[in-house]
Amino acid sequence: MGHVTRASLDKQPHEVASMFDDVAANYDLTNDVLSLGQDRRWRREVARAVDARPAQKVLDLAAGTGTSSMPFTERGAYVVPCDFSLGMLREGKKRHPWLPLTAGDAMKLPFRDDVFDAVTISFGLRNVQDTEAALREMYRVTRPGGRVVICEFSHPAWAPFRTVYEEYLMRALPPVARAVSSNPEAYVYLAESIRSWPEQAELARLLQRAGWAGVAWRNLTGGIVALHRGVKPVA
């Protein structure tokens, strides 16, 4: 499957930002319901993969309300939660006023070169208009020897399970979203973006093309989610 952009799903960047602004208040609850609680497990796996250490600098992209940043702060790392949705950041500031929540575009990050020990993004790369530009920016702001961890919805490897999963995405998810979300149309878009997202091997190739070394991935929940990792080479 080829490279996918938000534009190909008929959403411009400002429209996607507005969509996330609209769902900010109930976003974490809605995700918990729609994933049947699996999102908590997925985030624990991300925390293990990032392996944040005390005093390390971690950039958490698409951090939303900051929920995804908490495991890193609990490990003693200095975490910068970054998101392009001001509505999400405002909600996050209410909940976690001590976090250095930062507005930023993943395609043009407001940070210097070689700053972070680790860069991570969970369930957000799919919503960036230019995936490869974002991967290059993550590479730029990571120090040599630093790492990237990407957690994103993907494609089940077992064909029968994939069929069931895609039926859930397109048929069951919208009615559930209508019951729990303030903007159910946003979740129709999200379902479509998941179905259109590249296969695991294709995302690995994009990471390598951006300069990342040691690229690998593993499937979670049968491939509903994939965890990709890479390291910035030391010159």
Image (tube, helix red, strand yellow):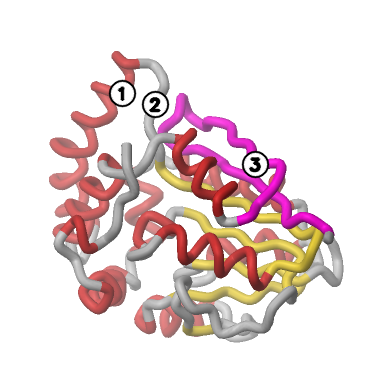
- First in sequence: mark 3 vs mark 2: 2
- On screen, residue 151 versus residue 216, left or right, reads left
Closest to the observer, 39 or 14: 14
- The reply to whether callout 2 and callout 1 are in contact (CB within 8 Å) is yes
- Find the distance from the CA under tag 3 to the CA under tag 2: 20 Å
Q: CA distance from mark 1 to mark 3?
A: 24 Å
Residue 145, how many percent across, how many down?
Answer: 81, 58
Q: Looking at the picture, does residue 22 appear above or below residue 163? A: below
For mark 2, give the secondary structure.
loop
What span is colored magenta in the figure?
Answer: 211-234
User: x, y percentage for residue 117?
Assistant: 77, 65
Q: CA distance from mark 2 to mark 1?
A: 5 Å
Label 2 sits on residue: 156
Q: Residue at x 52, y 42 (%)?
A: 205
Report the amino acid beneath label 1. Answer: Arg
Q: Which residue is mark 3?
A: 215
Give the main secondary structure, helix, strand or loop, of the magenta stretch: strand
Quadrant into which the C terminus falls: bottom right
Circle 1 sits on which residue? 162
- Give the number of the mark in front: 1 or 3: 3
Above or below, comparing residue 44 to residue 216 in the picture: below
SS for dot 3 = strand
In magenta segment, residue 219: yes
- For the point 16% across and 47% down, the residue is 174
